[in-house]
Amino acid sequence: MQSLRQASAVRGTRPLSSKPVVIRPRSVSCDAAALQFIKGVNESTVPEVRLTRSRTGANGTALFVFDNPSIFQASGDMGDITGLFMVDDEGTLSTTDVKAKFVNGKPQAIEARFQMRSQFEWDRFMRFMDRFAEENGLGFEK
C-alpha cells in the first residue's frame, strides 16, 4: 500500500504537508448521480456500460445499453429524447449520439455513445461513474 506521500508523487502533485488529513463524507444535500434522456426526468433503468480506451489514454468511449428503459413507458407530453445527460453534483455530461433499437416495430432498447477526447474528460466521466455505480450497486468487470 502506498503512503500518502508516495501517492501524491505518483499523481504529479506537490508533496503533502505534515498536517493530518481530514476526510469528510459528502454532504447529504448533494445531488445524486443520475442518467436522463429528458432533462429533469431521471431514467430508472440501470444500463450496461462498456468502456474502451486508447493505449495512450488520450481517447475513450462509453457505450450505454438500456434494455426496455422506463422512458418508453412515459407519456409523450414529457418531451422528446434529445440526448443522454449524466447529472451529478459536479454538473452535467451529455451526448446526442443516442439510438433506439426496435424489434417487430416496438422499441426494445436504447444505445448511447459518449466520446472522451482527453484525460480530463476521462477523469470527469470516471468520477460520475463512481458516484452512479455506488448508488446503483454496480461493479467493474474487465
Image: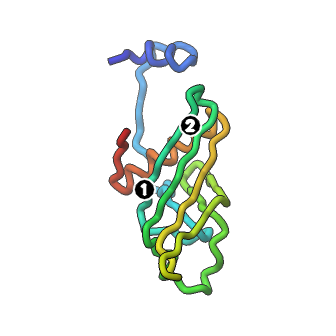
Residue at 55% in and 44% down = 125
How far apart in space, not on screen, are marks 2 and 1 (Cα)?
Answer: 20 Å
Q: Position of residue 140 (x, y in %)?
A: 37, 43
Front-lying residue, 6 or 45? 45
Q: Position of residue 27 (x, y in %)?
A: 45, 49
Closer to the N terminus: mark 2 or mark 1?
1
Residue at 60% in and 60% down = 85
Labels 2 & 1 near each other (Cβ < 8 A): no
Badge 1: residue crowd in 10 Å (few <14, some 14–19, many ≥20): few
As helix, strand or loop, the secondary structure at mark 1 comes to: strand
Q: How many marks?
A: 2
Report which residue position mark 1 lands on: 48
Residue at 56% in and 57% down = 87
Whether residue 100 is situated above or below residue 8 in the rendered picture: below
Q: Position of residue 52 (x, y in %)?
A: 52, 40
Q: Position of residue 14 (x, y in %)?
A: 57, 15
Q: Quadrant of the N terminus?
A: top left
Mark 2 or 1: in front is: 1
Front-lying residue, 54 or 82? 54
Badge 2: residue crowd in 10 Å (few <14, some 14–19, many ≥20): few
What's the mark number on residue 123? 2
